[in-house]
Image (cartoon, rainbow, N blue to C red):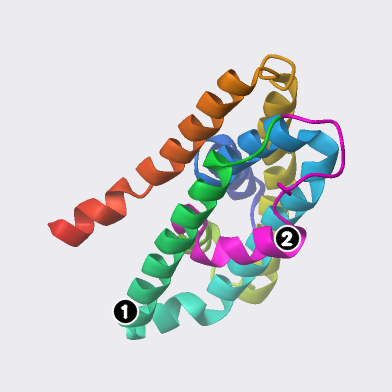
Amino acid sequence: MTLSLDLLLGFALFALVTSITPGPNNTMLLASGVNFGFHRTIPHMLGITCGFFVLVVAVGFGLGAVFQAYPLLYTVLRYVGAAYLLYLAWKIAHSGPVSDSEQGESKPISYLGAAAFQWVNPKAWIMAIGAISTYTPMQGYFTNVIVIAAVFALINLPSVGVWVACGTLLRNVLKDRRWLRLFNWGMAALLVVSLYPLLLESFS
C-alpha cells in the first residue's frame, strides 16, 4: 500500500514548513543570494535538495537504526557538523563585496559541498527522521521511502529558492560595503546561534 492522499497532503505541509523556515541552509542561501546572485547560487540550491534526498533515503533504509544502536556515532557526527557550521559562518562573515563579476576571491558553495553539508546539518537530520518516522507507512515501505524523499525534494527546491531570491533582491540595497559587512556578520551570527541547542545540551 502506498501513501494515502490525506497522509501525502499532511506530509507535503510538513515538508513545506520545514523547508522554508529559517535554518542553516536557508541562512547560507540568503547570504549567497546577496553576495553572488541567484544564478551563481543554483548549484548550492541543487546540492541541498539532492543531498537531502539521499539523506532521507538513507535514513529510511536503515541509517537511523545504526545511530540508535551506536549513539556515539551520531554524537561525533553532530560535533563535526557544528565545527563545519562554524567554518561556514566564518566564510560568510568574510565574504567579499557584492559584484556582478564571475571572478573574485570569494566563491559560492559548490554543488558537492552543499550536498555533503546535509549529512552534518542537524536540522536536515531532524527533518529526515521526522519524515520517515511520522509519514512513512510500513506497508509498501521501500516504495513509500522513495516517494517521501522525492516529494520532499520537489517541495524543498522552490522553498530554498525563495531565500536565494530574497537575497538577490537585497543586492542593490547592500552595494555599500559597510552595510554588506554588517549583513554578512549578521548571517554568520545566526548560523552560530543555530548551534545553541547543541551547546545547551552539552553543558546540561
Disc 2 on helix, strand or loop?
Answer: helix
User: Can the viewer see residue 109 in this picture?
Assistant: yes
What label does residue 71 carry, if any? 1
Which residue lies at the image location 69% right of the left edge and 53% below the top edge? 109
**Of the image marks 1 and 2, the number of the one nearer the N terminus:** 2
**Amino acid on which the number 1 mark rests in the picture:** Pro
Residue 7 at what x, y percent from top left?
58, 49
Residue 195 at what x, y percent from top left?
35, 50
**Amino acid on which the number 2 mark rests in the picture:** Cys
Q: Give the range drawn in magenta.
A: 98-124
Residue 14 at what x, y percent from top left?
54, 43
What residue does disc 2 label? 50
Which residue lies at the image location 70% right of the left edge and 71% below the top edge? 143
Q: How crowded is mark 1: few (under 14 residues within 10 Å), some or many (20 or more)?
A: few
Residue 82 in the image: above or below residue 9? below
> Do residues under tags 1 and 2 come within 8 Å of each other at their CB atoms?
no
Q: Residues within 10 Å of mark 2 (few under 14, many from 20)?
A: many
Which residue lies at the image location 74% right of the left edge and 16% below the top edge? 172
185 vs 73, left or right, is: right
**Residue 60 or 136: which is nearer the viewer?**
60
Disc 1 on helix, strand or loop?
Answer: helix
Residue 139 at what x, y percent from top left?
59, 72
92 vs 126, left or right, is: right
User: Can the viewer see residue 13 in this picture?
Assistant: no
Q: Would you say residue 121 sits in the magenta stretch?
A: yes
**Residue 8 or 107: which is nearer the viewer?**
107
